[in-house]
Image (spheres, rainbow, N blue to C red):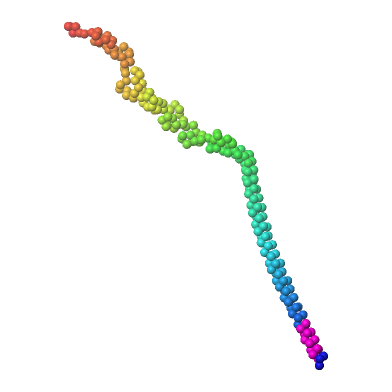
Amino acid sequence: MGNFYKWIFLAALSAITILGCTGSGNSEDDTSSDTGTGDVSDTGTGDVSDTETEDDSDTGTEDVSDTGTEADSDTESETDSDTSVLDCAGTLGGTATLDNCDVCDTDASNDCVQDCAGTWGGTATLDNCDVCDTDASNDCVQDCAGTWGGTATVDNCDVCDSDASNDCVQDCAGTWGGTAVVDNCDVCDSDPSNDCVQDCAG
């Protein structure tokens, strides 16, 4: 009878041991599935796709297009425009230009200008009376009073005005502005005291 109970105890112990081994196997499977598959998908696949894809798109594509294409195209365009264009003198990349009188040179200080009539390179000038033409012979002058284009004149008695009615005249002796007069005896002088008079016979 004692052996019977001993056998039952050993059988129960064996069953417990077998169940314990089965549970331990399941926990290893669970751990493997969590750490193996789960961790790989999170750290392996997820991290690689995030870092590699984003970094490549940001640094590879964008940086090349910004620094390579734009900088090269700008530099090449500026270089070509500077060296491949002929100036008016036929020099590649030269700085000579045509002024408004069709003179081609690099000296801006001698570029022709408009005259008073609006003609580029013209010779018309304004005189002191604001008359614009190319005839210097008709330029206005100052009169005796200092007025440009004025009409005041100096008469023979050195009087300057614009009133011709008061200009001095010659007297009988030929003196401009003189006072000599001819008396009735045809004597010309400026002494009225010696003027001849009529006698009693008239």
> Picture coordinates of residue 101 (x, y %)?
54, 36
Q: Is residue 171 magenta?
A: no
The residue depicted at 59 percent of the width and 36 percent of the height is 106
User: What secondary structure is the magenta-colored segment mainly?
Assistant: helix
Residues 183 and 18: in front is: 18
Which residues are drawn in magenta? 4-18
In the drawing, does residue 20 fall left or right of residue 145? Answer: right
On screen, residue 196 above or below 120? above
137 with respect to 57 (left or right)? left
Q: Residue at x 63, y 39 (%)?
A: 91
Instruction: Give the quarter of the image for residue 62.
Output: bottom right
Q: Residue furthest right?
A: 3
Image spot of residue 80 (x, y percent):
64, 46
Relative horizontal placement of residue 70, taking residue 123 as reference (left or right): right
- Classify 157 as above or below 141: above
Query: Image point 71% across, 73% down: which residue?
Result: 34
Extreme residue in the bottom direction: 1
Res. 102 in view: no
Q: Is residue 14 magenta?
A: yes
Instruction: Report the front residue among 76 and 13.
Output: 13
User: Does residue 189 appear in the picture of this structure?
Assistant: yes
